[in-house]
Amino acid sequence: MNKKRIIVTSLVILLPMLAGIFMWNMLPESIPVHWNFEGEIDDYASKAFAVFGLPLIMLGAHLICSLATLADPKTQNFNSKMLGIVLWICPVLSILCMTACYSASFGFDVRVEFIIPLFMGVLFLIIGNYLPKCKQNYTIGIKVPWTLNSEDNWNKTHRLAGIIWTAGSAIIIVGSFFKKAVIFTTFVPIVIMVFVPIIYSYLYYRKHGEK
């Protein structure tokens, strides 16, 4: 079942490559591949690298993450839906990023400074809803010594993380609509989402040990 999911998601990652081949003669020789925080294009790549290289790099990252996840000795603890989220991150990113690159190359105004924070917010919202249901493992979740050595610490930390990630993702989603505030409304919530559960896990360990 997991092999089939990896094959399907890998093929989805490569779909933009087929689209690029189909549009090859219409695409310019230099294609936008990077935007700054203001949403301005600040880097280009050759047509060949954009069409073939970027999807292949994404595929490589996808396979590494997928195989590393499935190699976890506690894979039996994985929530099936959470695993599905992990496997679909790179395919969605591939479609999203390559659509932006192709659209910009044809002269369309691509608001990357809105699209990326919005995507991140939605992704974190979905993950936040599943974190409390995530059982102890070495790949997905808040993986620090105190959670990995105590199932009780893991469960309490992930319940808190679910609340924080849901609230933080809501701020990121709303902030994506405000261009001037998007950096603040994206990075500050992410810092809180990452560090608060870790600090809580440590404090819980100090109080309760590894029971």
Image (tube, rainbow, N blue to C red):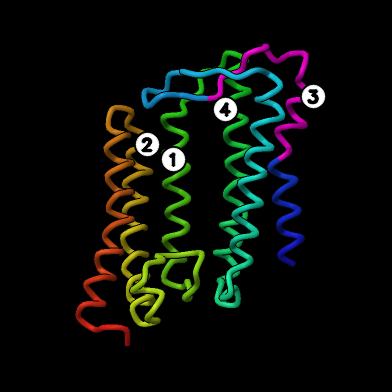
Residue on which the image places disc 4: 100
Reading the chain from its start, which is encountered first: label 2 or label 3? 3
Q: Is residue 20 magenta?
A: yes
The residue that appears at 37% across and 36% down in the rendered structure is 176
The residue that appears at 36% across and 34% down in the rendered structure is 177
Reading the chain from its start, which is encountered first: label 2 or label 4? 4
Reading the chain from its start, which is encountered first: label 1 or label 2? 1
Category of crowding for the residue at label 2, using alpha-carbon neighbours closer than 10 angstroms: few (below 14), some (14–19), many (at least 20): many
Residue 176: give its label: 2
Q: Secondary structure at mark 4?
A: helix
201 above or below 40?
below
Q: Which residues are magenta?
A: 14-33
Instruction: Tell which of 159 and 138 is nearer to you.
Output: 138
Side of 78 where 3 appears, left or right:
right
Reading the chain from its start, which is encountered first: label 1 or label 4? 4
Residue 51 position, x and y percent, is 70, 26
